[in-house]
Amino acid sequence: MSATESELVGAARRYLMNNYGAPLAAFVSGSGSVLVEDSGREVLDFLSGIAVCSLGHCHPAVTAAIAEQAGKLIHTSNFFANEHGPEVARLIEDLLAIGEGRVFFGNSGAEANEAAIKLARRYAGEGRRRIVALDGGFHGRTFGALSATGQPAKQIPFEPLVPGFAHVPPGDVGALEAELAKGDVAAVMIEMLQGEAGVVPVPDEFVLAARELTAAHGALLILDEVQTGFGRTGEWFAFQRLGIVPDMVTLAKAIASGFPVGALFARAEVAAAFQPGDHGTTYGGQALAMAAAKATIRTLVEIDAPSMARRKGALLGEALEKLPGVAGVRGSGLLLGAMLGSPVARTVQAKAFEEGLIVNAIGDSVVRLAPPLVVTEDEMATAVQRLGAALRRAGETE
């Protein structure tokens, strides 16, 4: 442990694997948009655990639901139902508003996407096994989800990957049609707003074409709303502004305020392809997780999360565009990427943390911001000031 490290950070470096890199700090508490380090320093969290804590840290309704359920029942096997799971599934179905379906609960976005891949192949049957995804998309780090991910830098160290995946450029309708014309595609998988690629929107006309083409060629359309779901982009789900009906939607992150929950929603006809024993996970849908999810979703509905994200996202985006060093802003709602005029994103991230602000560098020239949807206007103003200071300092050090 170095002289400047806290005891908790030093312990993390000693005992935990280095796959996340050295921790910048250790947090011991949080409330709303604020996290508190073990040193007592307060930091504005404009990443929300990577778009997870949409209600902020330790929202009273979620905290109370978890505490109450922990005193009643935490876990049984999935041979049994619990009092919260069906209600959470119903809430998801209602918010998606694409018709009757069924839900599989897992523990993460990667698990939700793994389930979608397996269900697509199970539904399609022999002879239609391939999954077509997009260059730049990110679907998780487990082997199926990694194989669907369109980022070679994340894939190459772990090859050979799962066979049966192809990738096309987002926006290239011709390339997509050519893959579907081969007749062996089970599903097309699209991340509506490519967060890990730099908060890059997939063109609307491409998504609309994908829906038409998959239907015409007998393939399914899977939309990955893991990062964009539950109001963050200004709609309950990013696809809804296009008025399309996907066959499957994968969800996680904001669904339970940081409690590990992922979910796959599939149209009833598609979901029926899964038979007992086809898929499962030990902890998925357990009572404690579902209590957290139910409290979270109900609260997001009460506060009208989409309109909150639209209004605050417009204010934040406008303020970011005025900062020297920011060449533009892309994204939707409160999932924004500040595009920098020079490749200093990682330096800006580090300097911002020193200023008391958590943001995330995506590549060399994009800084991602995804604050809690309950962030205040005063907190947004403070964050913009701190980011401006970080940009100035990054310019001085590069």
Image (cartoon, rainbow, N blue to C red):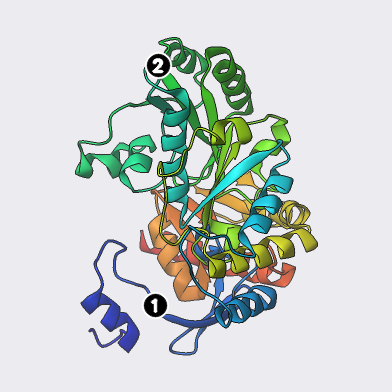
Q: Residue at x 23, y 39 (%)?
A: 156
Is residue 281 rendered to the left or right of residue 337?
A: left
Residue 131 in sight from this viewpoint: yes
Across and down, in percent, residue 86 comes to 65, 55
Across and down, in percent, residue 127 comes to 37, 17
Residue at mark 2: 184
Crowd tier of the residue under label 2, counting other residues whose Cα lies within 10 Å: few below 14, some 14–19, many 20 or above? many
Residue 201 in sight from this viewpoint: no
Task: Locate the N terminus and report the quarter of the image it occupies.
Answer: bottom left
Tell me the kind of residue under disc 2: Asp
Residue in the foreground of this view, choosing between 238 and 114: 114
Across and down, in percent, residue 44 comes to 57, 73
Task: Say above or below: 304 vs 59.
Answer: above
Element on which disc 2 rests: loop
Residue depth check, mark 2 versus mark 1: number of the one nearer the observer: 2
Q: Quadrant of residue 54?
A: bottom right
Is residue 347 rendered to the left or right of residue 157?
A: right
Element on which disc 1 rests: loop
Residue at mark 1: 25
Across and down, in percent, residue 292 comes to 60, 68
Q: Residue at x 20, y 36 (%)?
A: 160
